[in-house]
Image (tube, rainbow, N blue to C red):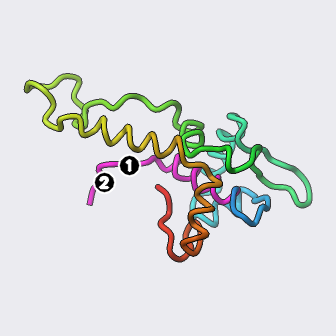
């Protein structure tokens, strides 16, 4: 079944990876560990981590005990920052049907796409990695844990 709202694989990897880096365990993860945890290609995950590092959201520490870590406290990093680090700035909602112009007067979806986009953007902007973990601890886990729904 096709989904109407979709997040790219890169954005999903970035969000899940950042959530793992922000986990209460507070440890560094290697790219290999992150990729294995979310069942993704290590090469693709590496490219996503590079984008997050380029935007100053994560850094890589070399040597024994090294790995990837967040550069700021999880409470200060929003889902929107993670998303835009890999996808670029959100653009205004366009035609749901992908048309440059409409053959009928007005929109047959009557602003539905704009409203849904605004609600999603608001959620991404006001939800931090730290807040996600605070909420999920009350539900019995985090990404993939019991009682939680994975983001994206």
**The N terminus, quarter of image:** bottom left
The residue lying at 47 percent from left, 66 percent from top is 149
Query: In the figure, 80 relative to 93: above or below?
Result: below
Secondary structure beneath dot 2 equals loop
The residue located at (28%, 38%) in the rendering is 113
| Label 1 Cα neighbours within 10 Å, binned few <14 / some 14-19 / many ≥20 | few
Residue 114 or residue 45, whichever sits in front: 114
Disc 2 to disc 1, C-alpha distance:
6 Å
From the image, tell me which residue sits under label 2: 3
- Which image quarter: residue 58? top right
Does the stretch in magenta take in 96? no
How many tags in the picture? 2
The boundaries of the magenta stretch are 1-21
Q: Is residue 4 left or right of residue 65?
A: left
Prevailing SS of the magenta stretch: helix
Residue at image mark 1: 6
Q: What element carries label 1?
A: loop
> In the rendered structure, are the residues bearing label 2 and label 1 in contact, judged by CB atoms less than 8 Å apart?
yes
Q: Is 14 covered by the magenta stretch?
A: yes
Q: Which mark is residue 53?
A: none
Viewer-side residue, 4 vs 71: 71
Residue 108 on image: x %, y %: 13, 35
């Amino acid at each position: 079944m096709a989904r109407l709202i979709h997040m790219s694989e890169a954005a999903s990897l970035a969000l899940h990876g950042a959530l793992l880096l922000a986990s209460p365990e507070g440890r560094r993860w290697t790219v290999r560990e992150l990729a294995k945890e979310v069942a993704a290609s290590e090469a693709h995950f590496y490219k996503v981590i590079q984008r997050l590092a380029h935007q100053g959201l994560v850094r890589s520490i070399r040597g024994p005990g090294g790995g990837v870590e967040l550069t700021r406290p999880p409470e200060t990093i929003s889902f929107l920052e993670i998303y835009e680090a890999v996808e670029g700035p959100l653009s205004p909602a366009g035609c749901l049907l992908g048309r440059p112009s409409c053959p009928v007067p007005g929109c047959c979806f009557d602003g539905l796409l704009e409203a849904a986009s605004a609600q999603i953007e608001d959620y991404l902007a006001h939800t931090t990695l730290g807040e996600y973990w605070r909420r999920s601890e009350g539900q019995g886990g985090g990404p993939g844990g019991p009682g939680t729904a994975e983001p994206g």
